[in-house]
Amino acid sequence: MDRRDLNRMFDALSPAPGREEELLRQLLQDDVRRKRPMKNWKRIVLGVAAAALLVTGAAAAAVPGLSQRLLAYLGVASEDSQAAELLIPGAMAVDITKKDNGAALHVTQVLRDRDCVMVLADFTAPEGTQLDMGEPDPPGIFTFKGFGDGSSCAVGFLNEAGEYIGKDGMVSGYGWDVLEDDDPLDNHVSLMLTMNPLMGEAETAWAAASLRVPAINLAYYDQGQRREVTVYSGDWSFDVPLPRKDIGWTMQMDQKVGEMDGSVMIAEELYLSPMTFELRMSREGGLDFGSPLDGQGEAAYGRWMSIGNNIKRIILTTKDGETIPLELCDSGGGIDFNEKLVVHRLSQITDPAKFQGGTLILEWDFHGSGSEEAGSVTIPLDGLAPVEP
């Protein structure tokens, strides 16, 4: 029985919130009303039943929830409980408040899978302050909005002792988003930190107990003025614990995709979580990117680095024939000279189990100095299975 089944069982058995003590009191009062008192063994059974009610209620209450703002950020409707259940095992409710210069940053939620860590926070300045985070970005354009400029304020992984782990403890890709706000000029703003540990950091990320997030000076980049504008000065840096449950499914493969610049492109592993698609690819033969490169070699390396842009279409189909559109998240995160990750976001939260027995179709168009090749390959997903704990 998995966790979702247990949650449903507890929900079915548990009394309504606040009813546990009342039910226990009523059970015990029944004995007082009886003309003939219960025997000791019946009293023991009654006590066990009452205790079970309390324990069941506590277990049901301990099941973590998900912030509606986080669900809305992922495109999940408030009434879509099935989508929320898929994400709950990878989520953690937190209550972290940092104060400085009269303002407070309140961190409330963490959600993660192999390719993404999301942290939800609320920033509140003193009454009367206007937190103007600039104009919304035009479609297809993303400008900095959040804390720091991304160079002096790097996020890092920590072990149980609070020490940095991994390469300098730092991660490669992260950014802040400002969530929709009914009053963008009031003293409050909601923010989402999204971090993608793509550059060979997956193992470090899962070994980490927490994430250190420097949150210095709320600011945004003004495109018109071409400069960073500080909205509110201060330091609200925090450490946040990380959920340790991987909500994804994976499948190993050894599928030739095509050739580019004298190298064979191979699809090695597929990873699917309810919100993320990841394809691990490798190259065999061709240039040695670990050695000094001439102009032609640098061009070939650039094509390999952006391998995701050469995969023109990815069609992910469930066992029942439903196609789930993907949205490009990263065109090809690096692992080393011969391995890359192509990461997309699923357009809707979907149970990875639905893809078991489905298909993955890759359509590519590789243009390199050694070839101009286009084609497609269909990969059955019969071997897709949950990530082992």
Image: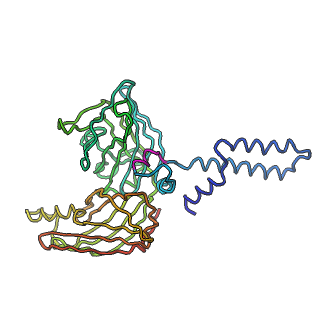
Residue 281, position in %: x, y? 28, 67
Relative to 208, does residue 146 appear above or below in the rendering? above
Question: Viewed as shown, does residue 319 lie left or right of 38?
Answer: left
Q: Determine if residue 160 is in view.
A: no
Q: In this view, does 34 lie to the left or right of 335?
A: right
What segment is highlighted magenta in the picture? Answer: 66-73
Farthest-out residue, right: 35
In the rendered image, residue 127, in percent from the top left (x then y), is placed at 39, 24
Image quadrant in which you'd find residue 203: bottom left
- Residue placed most toward the observer, 151 or 73: 73
Q: Residue furthest left?
A: 295
- Image location of residue 387, percent across then percent down: 44, 64
| 341 inside magenta stretch | no
Residue 189 higher or lower than 126, as above or below: below
Count of numbered badges drawn on the protein? 0
Residue for point 35% across, 42% down: 213
Between 163 and 189, the residue placed more toward the observer is 189
Q: Is residue 229 visible?
A: yes
Q: In this view, does 249 lie above or below 66?
A: below
In the image, what residue occupies the spot 40% across and 66% down? 250
Name the one closer to the observer, 163 or 95.
95
Principal secondary structure, stretch drawn in magenta = helix
Which quarter shows the N terminus? bottom right
- Is 33 on the left or on the right of 259, as rendered? right
